[in-house]
Image (tube, rainbow, N blue to C red):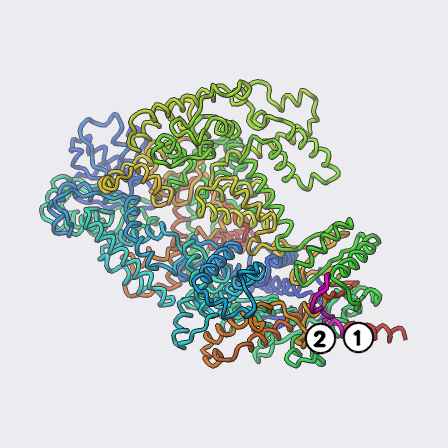
Amino acid sequence: MFNPRPNQKEILSYTHGFMGVSAVPGSGKTHTLSRLAANLISSNVLDDNQEILIVTLVNSAVDNFSSRIAGFMTEFGLLPDLGYRVRTLHGLAHDLVKERPDLAGLSDRFTIVDERETNEILANAVRGWLRAHPGFAAEWLAPEIDLDSDSYIAKSWESGLESLAKNFIRQAKDLQATPHVLTDALAKYKIRHSLLDFGLDIYSAYQRALSYRSAVDFDDLIRLALLVLQSDPDYLMRLRHRWPYILEDEAQDSSLVQEQILTLLSGDQGNWVRVGDPNQAIYETFTTASPEHLRRFLRRGDVTARDLPDSGRSQPGIIKLANELIRWTMEEHPVEDLQNSLTTPLIRPTPPGDPQPNPPDDPAGIVLYDQKLTPSAEIDTVVRSVKAWLAQNPDKTVAVLAPRNKRLVKMADDLHAAGIETVELMNTSQSTRQTAVLLQEILEMLAKPVDALRLGKVYKGINRERWEAPETRDLCRAVHHLITRNPKVEDYLWPRTGVTWLEELNAQSVDSAAIQELEIFQQLARGWHEAVLLPIDQLILTIAQDLFAEPTRLALAHKIALLLERSAQTHPEWHLWNFALELADVAANQRRLDGFSEEEIGFDPDQHKGKVAMATIHKAKGLEWDRVYLLSASNYDFPSAQEYDQYLPEKNFIRGKLNLEAEALSRLKAVMAGDPAALYLEEGLATTQARLDYCAERLRLFYVGITRARRMLTVTWNNGQDGGGSRENQASLPFVHLSAYWKETRNADSR
Amino acid sequence: MDRFAYTPVQEQIIAAPLAGSRYISGPPGCGKTSAAVGRLRRMIEQGITAESILILTPQRSLAAPYAREISRPDLPAGGLPTIVTLGGLAQRTLQLFWPAVAGSSGFRHSELPPTYLTLETAQYYMAKVAAPLFERGYFEQLVIDRNRLYSQILDNLNKAAVVGFAHTDISRRLKNAWIGKPEQTIHYEQAQECANLFRAYCLEHNLLDYSLQIELFAQQLWPSHLVRQYLSNQYRHLIYDNLEEDVPVTQDIIREWLPAFDSSLLIFDQGAGYRAFLGADPANGETLRELCDQTGEFSQSFVTEPALQELGNAFSNILRPKAEKTVTPRALTGYSFAPSRFYPEMIDWVAAEVARLVHEEGVPPGEIAIVSPFLSDALRHSLMHRLLGHGVTARSHRPSRSLRDEPAARCLLTLARLAHPLWNLPATPQDVRAALLQIIGDIDLVRADLISAMLFSQRNKQAPLNSFDLVKPEMQERITFSIGERFMRLRAWLMDYIESEPAELDVFLARLFGELLAQPGFGFHDNYEAAGVTARLIESVQKFRRVTEATLQATGRSIGQEYLMMVADGVLAAQYLLPADEPPPDAVLVAPAYSFLMINQPVRFQFWLDVGSLGWWERLYQPLTHPHVLSRRWQPDKAWTDVDDFSANQETLQRLTSGLIARCREHIYLCAARVNERGTEEKGPLLYGIQSLLRLARELEAGHV
């Protein structure tokens, strides 16, 4: 039973109008919002064809919401699945466009390109463009750079431009600027700027390439969703009728276009509840996402503003630390422009008697290790600590969090070397990989059906869990042994006349359970053999229907099917083996399926007790562990706009260490905002502004990292120099402050 | 009267004097067509010259009952009535009167005979005409593959012809209805330009696509006194069935022609109009009623039980916005709601329930239909496979797709490549394996793989298949001698062919099919579906040959080679597959809902799959065409808004559901999966309609109603 706290009750008493909620980490906002949805549905405010629309950030949250609401609905004695729809912004955009593709200029069979295809198109376009514009490099590279003699820099230069192009296109789409619109706008101001020329040319080439593939990308989908809403007022009215209530989660990461879409859908007199934590806005760089949208909404006169400040997640010491970070930022941050990076409400421990009490106070569980370490020493220190702690706490959860993936790869290697198991939340989740690997193995088996080892691999793959479970372990291994030792696969799968292989086994007194198991697998494998002539996407779906029941796996198989169908269109000559190789790419983590990172599958730290979860802080959002190690708290990853700080996006080989991306994007925004004056501002101003934005986001990232911990938190930093070098990193400013604050607090406590 | 007893109403139609015009209407399943067939028989038996009878239907499949009747051996000997669609009539008439119209219609070579284009060959030429425009950046903002783009431009031309407006007016109509951003209308202009260029190309080269055939017939031939006299002399009696599914221009012609017939019988199916997306105009058709001397209503259904009829009424009211929503206790026995959490679970459940009906309740499989808005290969395969696993025979029917997607067509074309080494279109071991899987009866994947790995040589083009005798004995044993023997027959056939003078591709295919594949022991033997695909492929090649022979000869390219390349490009795309005339075998039918309706064979049990899918409700969205805006019912200057879109979809759903219910005798299973095939939740209007039905049922059971 859900027993709401007083602040939650306030929110649950909502009946209509606009409401904004600032929620601190661990305050139960998902639970409250789910309950609010269930309350509204059960209160009979909806017609048969109406729904509550819930919009959230990632797909794992979609499942989370759906199952919670379904749970409440069942509690109320109602049908669990009707009356609401939970979508990510992408999912919602897809629904909107899919229902009226004509308004978006799409056919109903449009497809969505994945990240690799996007990257391939961009890489080709950039390479071609650079060849045609030999003067461009000379204009922007530092004078001493010679690309011909330094292949590393040449590569970085190109990949930097690909990233620039990608963000340019994304930003343009966010601003609803098609290449055509942008060309007209540039012509109006009669301005030529090589970065804008570059961005626009690549954008045009990219859109042409998409159109040729009869595809859109994810940003198009959102852009087009807004377009269809703006195109047909009747459609908008129908959708407003369908969704009389909109509940928006993670509103701090709402982009401009998301806000526009939801504003249109709710209407002037609508019912719209936005819940978020402005302090956890960490997806803003080079997007129009900004916590400012939520803050502005909370300040509106017609909006009821509420707080959810109580959190039972962390022990009091960790809450103090997080609150001190907010206070210090707001009051003492040396850079005034950064003082609004974090805001109140502060986190409040839950009141006595609360069903979710905070873990007991344990100041010793918090370590802000301020000693300078080399990168390897930092990892060594953490590995040793983790090993010792896990030995004593095998039933607890622990995570190592770092700002960047690269650091985690090294960390994971060292943990493995120390005999510690890890769970990775990197680009592709294990579940994605497992699904892709399994499908890949089945395709390989179908490509080479004569090979008993491949057949055995498939058997093992589909019995992954039973393979390890004590009660089925021996059986699975025995069956696997029989399959792989049989040189004539056809005698097993397609026996002809005479005594069949299975009958022979029977005669040899092989365990009847094993025979039964072999018969079941025989049926399955035969079914796939018979499906082998289907088009590749349909083959994948057929296999998926035999193997998977969970929505995430089915959805993933569907994505894989689409991916392979697209490959088949581009390469009509491909056979099963090529498709299997393609899947091997996904499985080997080289190819992220868009919209299918680990969040899709949902990650539950409590399922991995005794193992170390490895994640970037970004990926760790929304999750919590008993113990958290936060790495790399240096000024390289968490700069504070200080003289001595360095910035990841600024490259030494670019003239004046300009941030080209920032320079290009600020001009793009100026063009689209009709602000010609901003177009002529001197170079470097955008780079400086980008520094501030970056610093602000990094402060929030630090806050998110700290608030992942329930009971214990260890923060370390490193100087970035294993082998010596010109400039070493320092401890980041917020870390230095918190470290001092914590010492003082401990001292005061001990006094 | 030898097969079943007619009702008095039917008797009345059959026995009515063979003079004057009659119009009968009624919902499906009331015996209207049966009465008309009875009347046809009576006419012939009474000595009316069969050749003077014209039987007109909007689609060939709808004429199947008439075709069956005239092929019965007990019918009096003599000529045959003409069973035809408007397109067919246009073609026949054009062949006769071509010299008279060619010159005045702008054809450059009026002295030469015309070439009739099929959908495929029209697409082939459209691709030729439009390709240079793509180079100039046409359709850049549009997200659609080229073959679909071509077919939409052709569709627009056809719509203009069947609705009866100038083909040059297409873009204006579409633009006027467009409500979105004005810059998107440039595509309409570009599509118009393509259509105009295509028309000019046809006039230049004496090509007659469907739109030109209809236009010439309706605008040049029909108004001509000479032609009218010819047609009126030829046909004295008319049976016009399913006129609600026909296009306005046919209905208009019949309107003018009607007084000239000695007798005419017009049949209108109420609530139908499923071919609206192809231009069908039931409202225009219904106006023919006023011109008829006698009108009659058929109302008593031979098909549906009262429970189903009441369910149909309840459903109609639920889907109509302002109708009173009620349900009768009897209607509740007409359906079951079967929710599943996941899609595969739903398929399993359906297969098991069908098996229960067949094995435990003794329901003949042919009395069961499983329908869904779309029938993907995966769904079809999964269902058929599961049904087979339960020991239930099943067949599937769906309109055909691109030939390159048909495994049987791919198999035939692989053999064509092996047989024509000079074409230089090599096959891979995987192609050969796939072909073997279909060619050799009861072969399996493992053995097909063994053969293709050991006995196929990519290098030796003159003898791509090696002898089975070369294989080691233990391998021969693994493959089995019976498979080896058939492989050797295939090899011998192929070698013979390679060594002889090459035939045209269609001749090659026909020989391959007849001499080898259709023989016992080979995969196409007794395989109606593969035989159907072969027939279609041969027809497609023949038409392609007829149309392109002259042009290709000039370039020196082989027709077969060109054809294969076009198939690979997907240019030679879908043709509508016509159902066989023979009565269906006793098997569970798995079909898209619309195909099931157009087959028009009622069953006792229906399973509606994935009722949450939006596919039950929404039309196909095509960015360059619009079935409603290009229809006659649409005011040319009005904007098409979501209100129109919504009500059109709602009407579609209502028509579809009532059409299905009218073709069900006993019970409907409404099957839902919370998570669809794609792993997402879909809650379309049909599901909401069902929810309302369930709510009414609950209230009824609780005694609130």
Q: Amino acid at mark 2?
A: Ile
> Residue at coordinates 68% horizontally, 68% vertically from top-left?
A636
Looking at the rendered structure, the secondary structure element under dot 1 is helix
Tell me which numbered mark, 2 or 1, is placed earlier along the sequence: 2
Q: Look at mark 1 in the image and give the residue it sits on.
A: A741
Label disc, if present, on residue B551 of the rendered structure: none
In the depicted structure, whether residue B519 falls above or below residue B27: above
In the rendered image, the quadrant that contains the C terminus of chain A is bottom right
Q: Determine if the magenta segment contains residue A733.
A: yes
Q: Residue at x 69, y 34 (%)?
A: A476
Chain letter, disc 1 residue: A
**Residue A122 image offset from top left, x and y in percent:** 49, 59
Q: Position of residue A610 (x, y in %)?
A: 77, 52
Give amino acid for label 1: Tyr
Q: Which residue is mark 2?
A: A326
Q: Give the magenta-colored segment's residue range.
A: A720-737
Which one is nearer the viewer's eye here, B523 or B303?
B523
What secondary structure is the stretch in magenta mostly built from? loop
